[in-house]
Amino acid sequence: MLIHDANLQLALDMVGVFVFALSGGLVAVRKRLDVVGVIVLAWVAGLGGGTIRDVLIGAVPPVGVSDWRQMAAAAAAGLLTFVFHPGFGRISRFVRVLDALGLAVFAVGGSLKALGYGVTPITAVVVGVVTAVGGGMMRDVLAGQVPEVLRHELYAVPALLGSTIVVVASKTEHLNVVVVWLAVALVFAVRMGAVMLDLNAPKPLRTGDRS
């Protein structure tokens, strides 16, 4: 049974940081920020969720200010988007894809790291969701837009699904590398399916909508 494999955790974190940082950099480019703004938004998007996660489970100092590899990955992603963003094309759609991948990796990786620190199952699920949505929320707030988790297609639900799978697999002694990456793939697929099919969580009816 796999509880906390350092190499797997690092792989999940590096992938999550880089793709979320790319999404942050692209949002900054879309908002016409300068190079400093692009790097800052990339750092926040890439490392914000992991920083919140580490504070919640007592893994301090958090990776956002202590792991040079992840900090370098976030900065590199910001610079890449600043220099090469014209080649990405259709920035909005590309941000959604990167965001879905970051969501999937961080939901699973967040729960996995929380389990390694001996938290309760419900805490591990919550930490996984917070890790997944935290960086994106901070990115959107700094960019002056409503966070993705609060609008449009299903966002937190796929993260909750991935985190729950990891925790249940751990408690039933079925958690291994294959299960981890299958959970990542499932979260990504559900999130992208929600984007393509415009699937939304229920919203309150507007005044006058009731018959």
Image (cartoon, rainbow, N blue to C red):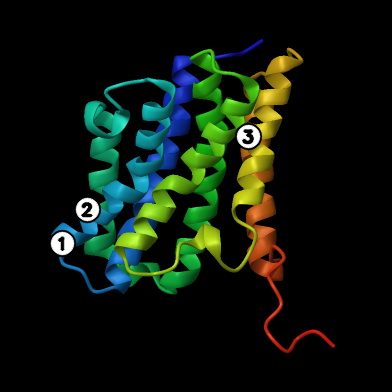
According to the picture, the residue beneath numbered tag 1 turns out to be 35
Using a 10 Å C-alpha cutoff, classify the residue at mark 1 as few (fewer than 14 neighbours), some (14 to 19) or many (20 or more): some
Quadrant assignment for the C terminus: bottom right
Pick whichever of labels 2 and 3 is earlier in the sequence. 2
- In the rendered structure, the answer to whether residue 133 lies left or right of residue 88 reads right
Q: Nearer the viewer, residue 142 or 173?
A: 142
- In the rendered structure, the answer to whether residue 194 lies left or right of residue 66 reads right
Asked if residue 30 is positioned above or below residue 131 in the image, the reply reads: below
Q: Position of residue 114 (x, y in %)?
A: 51, 22
Using a 10 Å C-alpha cutoff, classify the residue at mark 3 as few (fewer than 14 neighbours), some (14 to 19) or many (20 or more): many
Which of the labelled discs sits on residue 40, or is there none? Answer: 2
Q: Is there CB contact under 8 Å for labels 1 and 2?
A: no
What is the quadrant of residue 69 in the picture? Answer: top left
Distance (Cα) linking label 2 and label 3? 28 Å
| Residue 119 in sight here | yes
Amino acid tagged 1: Val
